[in-house]
Image (cartoon, rainbow, N blue to C red):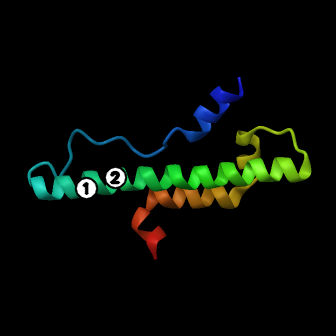
């Protein structure tokens, strides 16, 4: 049962590719755009894994019995960081 909750927490909220992609006419730009989107998804997943590790450590240290989703909801800073990856992945590097 906990496994299903984790899957929901780790599902990417990144926007799906648009059928009317303005980059479709230039293959080199489309390749770059696709690579950028893939990199953003990997970055989001990596950040969630770091957050999950922090959750496990917090639960062990404080002997909590809360779900990962509830723990994430109690940490608005992590939600803002995740949203900033989705909104502006290039800004995360700066």
- Which secondary structure, mark 1? helix
Mark linked to residue 37: 2
- Residue 27, how many percent across, how many down? 10, 52
Q: Residues within 10 Å of mark 2 (few under 14, many from 20)?
A: some
Q: For this view, does 1 lie left or right of residue 30?
A: right
Quote the CA–CA distance across marks 1 and 2: 6 Å
Q: For this view, does 71 lie left or right of residue 15?
A: right
- Residue 65, how many percent across, how many down? 86, 38
Quadrant in the picture for residue 2: top right
Mark linked to residue 2: none
Query: What residue is drawn where x is 52% and y is 38%?
Result: 11
Query: What residue is drawn where x is 59% and y is 33%?
Result: 8
Query: What residue is drawn where x is 49% and y is 43%?
Result: 13
Q: Are marks 1 and 2 in contact (CB under 8 Å)?
A: yes
| Residue to which mark 1 is pinned | 33
Work out whether 89 lies above or below 64: below
């Amino acid at each position: 049962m906990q496994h299903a909750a984790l899957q929901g927490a780790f599902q990417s909220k990144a926007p799906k590719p648009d059928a009317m992609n303005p980059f479709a006419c230039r293959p080199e730009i489309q390749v770059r755009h696709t690579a950028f989107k893939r990199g953003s998804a990997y970055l989001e997943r990596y950040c969630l894994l770091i957050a999950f590790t922090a959750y496990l450590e917090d639960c062990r240290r404080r002997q909590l019995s809360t779900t990962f989703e509830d723990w994430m909801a109690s940490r608005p800073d992590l939600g803002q960081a995740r949203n900033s990856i989705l909104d502006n992945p290039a800004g995360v590097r700066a």
